[in-house]
Amino acid sequence: MEETLQVALIQSHLLWENPTANLVNFDALLEDVSDSTQLIILPEMFTTGFSMDPVTHAESMDGKTVQWLKKWSQKKNAAVCGSIIITDDNKYYNRFLFATPEGKIQSYDKRHRFMMAGEGGLYTAGQETMLIEYKGWKIFPQICYDLRFPVFARNTVEYDVLIYVANWPKPRVGAWDALLKARAIENMSYCIGVNRIGLDGNGLEYVGHSAVYNVLGDEIAFAKAEEKIITATLSKNHIKETRQRLPFLEDKDEFKII
């Protein structure tokens, strides 16, 4: 078990529906990630941008990007994660993938599809949450629009870190900032959000605001509208001491997602 967890958030522009070029760009960015990093987080649909063309761009769980994630995880001796378009059992998913240096892949399928963009008609909704255990840390992954649904992220399993990967556009970035902070406070966990920058193929602008918030909702890392790697050190002691001093989670409501 690791007392601390060194994380790197990679905030980047995404070339529209161009997986090859995006992977080349991330190759260069990953080279600059410190060797002490233990967890590297990429944005939502980091190979394509928020594409509504899964027929053209979906990959299998044995495809190029999954192998790329495994390669970089082994090379950096760190977990590498983010979401891409996956086809599985003749369905399409916006799937969060978590690759570890041992070659293991864990996944979570986005539950809340963004209907305003047509995601609901093209992608199948995930039916289950995922709790990832890595180096003694319990990590709860979510994807973009999931951020607006706090019940789904309620900390009933004592997770340590809540992660959101996103393509969250500029007009609503104020909500992104506020909700990330709220999720940290109400769940008494670290909350990490990784967003993209730049323009997509629909003309939407993204301004980043990737961030890390601690258990009290204090901002400990933040990136404005620039391509940047931001880092943070997460502390188990911070979680333990704060939860003991302020045992709010003990008063939580009991319910199940069905």
Image (tube, rainbow, N blue to C red):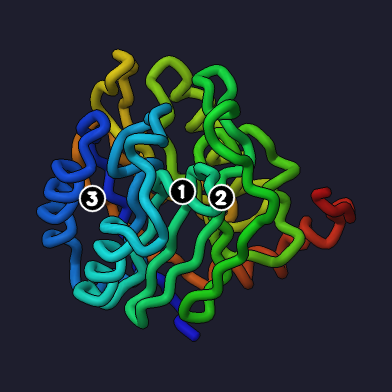
**Which mark sits nearer the N-terminus, 2 or 1?**
1
Secondary structure, mark 1, is strand
Secondary structure, mark 2, is strand
Given residues 73 and 119, the one toward you in this image is 119
Is residue 219 visible in the rendered structure shown here? no
Q: Position of residue 9 (x, y in %)?
A: 32, 52
Mark 1 or 3: in front is 1
**Residue matched to label 2:** 109
**Which mark sits nearer the N-terminus, 1 or 3?**
1
Residue reaching furthest bottom?
A: 1
Q: Residue at x 46, y 48 (%)?
A: 87
Q: Amino acid at mark 2?
A: Asp
Q: Is residue 3 above or below residue 130?
A: below
Given contact means CB atoms under 8 Å apart, are the residues at marks 2 and 1 in contact?
no
Q: Position of residue 131 (x, y in %)?
A: 61, 65
Looking at the image, how many numbered discs can be counted on the residues? 3
State the separation of the CA atoms marked 1 and 3. 30 Å
Disc number placed over residue 25 in the picture, else none: none
State the separation of the CA atoms marked 2 and 3. 25 Å
Horizontally, is 240 left or right of 250 in the view? left
Disc number placed over residue 229 in the picture, else none: 3
Given contact means CB atoms under 8 Å apart, are the residues at marks 1 and 3 in contact?
no
**Residue matched to label 1:** 87
